[in-house]
Amino acid sequence: MIQIVKQYAIKGATKQYLEDCLIAYKKDTLLEIAKTHSISVKKSQTKTVMAARLAESILHQFDEDYTHLSEDDKSEIVTVVNIMKSENRTDTTDRTEAQLNLILKGYVYFFAENQTVKTIVPLELAEKIATLSEDGISESDPSMVEWFLKTKMAIENIYAYCSLSHLVNTWNKHATKSVTIKEIEPFFNNPTRE
């Protein structure tokens, strides 16, 4: 497992966004990720061009791909997101071969800096996971209102604002019981800005 970290760890400061994480990789790793997603890139392209193409494709395919991940892969990526969200941000993640699949998909990244290794999920993907996961990326099984509150807070931490209509639309796409804005609105302190 140390070999996986040595092979895929990015040296230097942690990056937050998908394209920045991809640019930090060597070309060979970008080509591996492209192959995993069946994305056509040429070795003659610059890393910047490759990373932009990969980031666009990964973001476009992520919702569909996430639903097809194994339960172990979903659990692993949610664990990394939860570590990133925690206040102390202590990364005690065991870097295992299970993460190799997520690395080769471009969903999880290792950053090696100052003798420590941090595992991250880019913010764009973390936000998508928050909206795709019915449990709002929680270890417990929260109610619908808790999902809305947690997801709204996660999105606001990233973008400073979260539209209630966006949350309702996302919920209705993935949940068995649909809701309306009027049903959810009373649970939020601030009125919607729609």
Image (cartoon, helix red, strand yellow):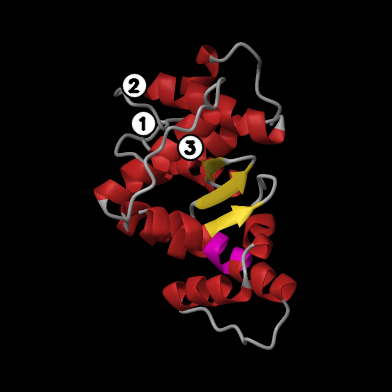
Describe the element under mark 3 as helix, strand or loop.
helix
Label whose residue precedes the other's in the sequence (1 or 3): 3
The kind of residue on which mark 1 rests is Asp
Q: CA distance from mark 1 to mark 3?
A: 13 Å
Q: Residue at x 32, y 41 (%)?
A: 75
- Label ID, residue 135: 1
Asked if marks 2 and 1 touch (Cβ < 8 Å), the reply is: yes
Asked if marks 1 and 3 touch (Cβ < 8 Å), the reply is: no
Asked if marks 3 and 2 touch (Cβ < 8 Å), the reply is: no
Q: CA distance from mark 3 to mark 2?
A: 17 Å
Q: Position of residue 168 (x, y in %)?
A: 50, 35
Identify which residue, 193 or 114, lies in the foreground: 114
The reply to whether residue 151 is visible in this rendering is yes
Q: Residue at x 32, y 55 (%)?
A: 97
Q: Residue at x 51, y 30 (%)?
A: 151
> Magenta stretch?
55-60
Question: Which marked residue is nearer to the observer: mark 1 or mark 3?
Answer: 3
Q: Position of residue 158 (x, y in %)?
A: 66, 35
Q: Which residue is mark 3?
A: 81
Magenta span dominant secondary structure: helix
Q: Which residue is mark 2?
A: 142
Quadrant of the snapshot with the C terminus: top right
Describe the element under mark 2 as helix, strand or loop.
loop
Describe the element under mark 1 as helix, strand or loop.
loop
**Horizontal relation, residue 28 to residue 175: left or right:** right
The kind of residue on which mark 2 rests is Pro
* Vertical comparison of 52 with 139: above or below: below
